[in-house]
Image (cartoon, rainbow, N blue to C red):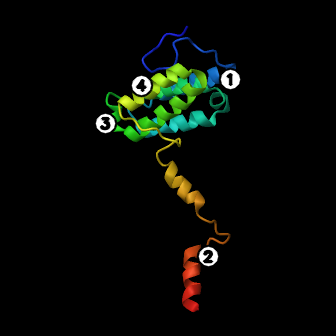
Amino acid sequence: MATRTGGLCPAVRPSFSAAAAAELSKLKKEVKNAIGKPELLLHLLRSAHEVRAIAQEPAALCKVCDWLLRSFGPNPIQDSLDAYAVVCSVKLRGLRETDAQEASDFEAFMKDRGIPYKEGLSPRSSSRQQIRTQPRRLNPQEPPLQQQQQQQEQQQ
């Protein structure tokens, strides 16, 4: 039975694929250089998501999140809540796939400390979605659709 580690991934060391273990080793070194830098920590989380060997193993992504959460500094909730919440949310999703009890404990930790659950990977995901939902223009010289509609209405 795994021992609880205060909201961290289970103490029983999961076995990762060789590819994931190699990528985790590289990423751990980068995390050490990003201590106290929330934007860089989020960049490393995005990088981990892009590495197929890590993204396919929830336990490996959970391990990355553990490292990142420890690297935010002494007051992450006061200093960088949005970034901290993103990493917590990604970790929670990974825990839900690997250990339901640990996920429940971690969710209680987030709730007790007022850490909001974030759906996207980054705090800027909502602005990215807004950009994607705008219709694309085939000709960049052409005015946006709203301007075209206003011009047509004025002409009528």
Q: Which residue is mark 3?
A: 78
Residue nearer the viewer, 96 or 67: 96
Q: Which residue is mark 2?
A: 142
Q: CA distance from mark 1 to mark 3?
A: 36 Å
Which of the 4 image quarters holds residue 27?
A: top right
For mark 3, does the 10 Å Cα neighbourhood hold few (<14), some (14 to 19), or many (20 or more) residues?
few
Circle 1 — which element? Answer: helix
Q: CA distance from mark 3 to mark 2?
A: 45 Å
Circle 2 — which element? Answer: loop
Residue placed farthest to the bottom in the image?
156
Indicate which disc, 2 or 1, sits on the residue closer to the N terminus. Answer: 1
Q: Residue at x 63, y 31 (%)?
A: 55
Circle 4 — which element? Answer: helix
Indicate which disc, 1 or 3, sits on the residue closer to the N terminus. Answer: 1
Q: Which residue is mark 4?
A: 70
Q: Amino acid at mark 4?
A: Arg
Q: Which residue is mark 1?
A: 19
> Number of numbered discs present?
4
